Image: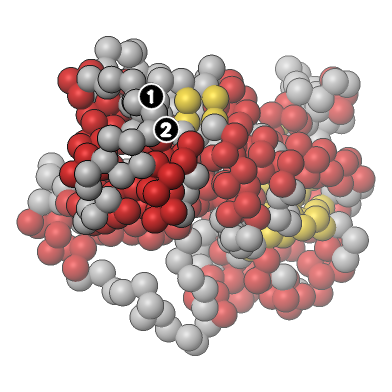
Amino acid sequence: MAGRREMPVDPAAGPVQRFASELRALRAQTGGITYRSLARRAGYSVTTLSQAAAGEQLPTLPVAVAYAGACGGDPAEWEARWKAAVEEAAADDSRGEEETPAPYRGLARFETGDSDLFFGREQLTADLVDLLGRRRFAALFGPSGSGKSSLLRAGLIPVLRNVEKPDHRPATIRILTPGEHPARSHAAVLTPVAVRDGGKGGDEADTFVIVDQFEEVFTLCHDPAERARFIDLLLTSRQPGSRLRVLLAVRGDFYGRCAEHRGLADALRDANLLAGAMSQAELRQAVVKPAATAGLTVERALTARLVEEVADAPGGLPLLSHALLETWRRRRGKTLTMAGYEAAGGLDGAIAKTAEEVYGRFTAQQTAAARTCRPFGAVPRTSAARRRRPTAREVLLTPSSAAPRNDGSSPPH
């Protein structure tokens, strides 16, 4: 065999070493083609290809497939081998470790207790706090998938609870979603709390009411009179003596619907913020800092790739969070790797891969129930509220929520 001799690798040492040994064996079957010739065939550098078979770490999927293909291997077979090696390596690394909480939330929203893992929205949080300090009634608009619900719970609420000046802290913070009968269900919530005896703020501290998914007043509440009554109740917070402050979180495509109520349109004219796309620096924080909090690192190449992919993906934050969670599950030691990310399916494929795994665990009864679900593409076009693609969370959770559980009970919400 021409070229520099490779260091021995023990295939029994683990899945990484075994995969490297299999690559070497495949190359040997070609008569020991040199890495220089292999590089010309595969389109990767000599260094990259030699490292792929070194047994120190798994190569990325494209490198592994290119190596095998240049040696006459079947790409589909070697992709399957590579994925099996990734899964086995992740299982080996986690074996014997104590169960540790994931630093990423996946498709679940961040809650108030997750503030130590919530990064990248510090400036928008500060802008919201400033807006609420100047206006008793305000709104946050943003597209689906921009992280509004997480921002409210893990960003805004913890900051409001820890305002430096005690007399500026809210007396209490209430958060709600409108539902089908918002005025009937939530009128009592819009009564300010009595703070003179034991309140957290000063004697005149305001009660903060956060209305998440405000668009439900248009999509779920079908009674125009009740809708108007609920909005009027919210607008009472504009009165200086109300001791209420209200923040609405609204999906961006309902901005125009807010103009249907004259009082609401007037209130929001100069009292709204837009949750736009995160900057590259903010995305980098959202990727790296949760891992660092858990004592982990993210490969630089993986961080760069995630930032690049999410920057061009409208509403891509749920996809990012889920891909990071699945990559964490496939981590090598204390490192989130590019190989783990690719094995998870990447930004676009991670949800589909997880959904397939969930579907594969269905009982026959659950499978039958899931098949009765209306296809996502068959959406009525009679309402602007329904003319949108399902969110990543809906894609993953709808089939399983439709299926009955083994014990006959309803699935948790």
Spatial distance from mark 2 to mark 1, Cα to Cα?
A: 8 Å
Residue at 29% of width from left, 28% of height from top? 16
Q: Which residue extends farthest left?
A: 364
Amino acid of disc 1: Glu
Residue at 73% of width from left, 17% of height from top? 198
Determine whether 91 is above or below 76 in the image. Answer: above
Q: Do the residues labelled 2 and 1 touch (CB within 8 Å)?
A: yes
Determine whether 230 is above or below 222 in the image. Answer: above
Q: Which mark is residue 56?
A: 1
Please identify the quadrant where the N terminus is shown: top left
Q: Position of residue 378 (x, y in %)?
A: 36, 80
**Residue 323 vs residue 85, the one in the foreground:** 85
Residue at 20% of width from left, 70% of height from top? 372
> Viewer-nearest of labels 2 and 1?
2
Mark 1: which secondary structure? loop
Residue under circle 2?
51
Occupied quadrant, residue 95: top left
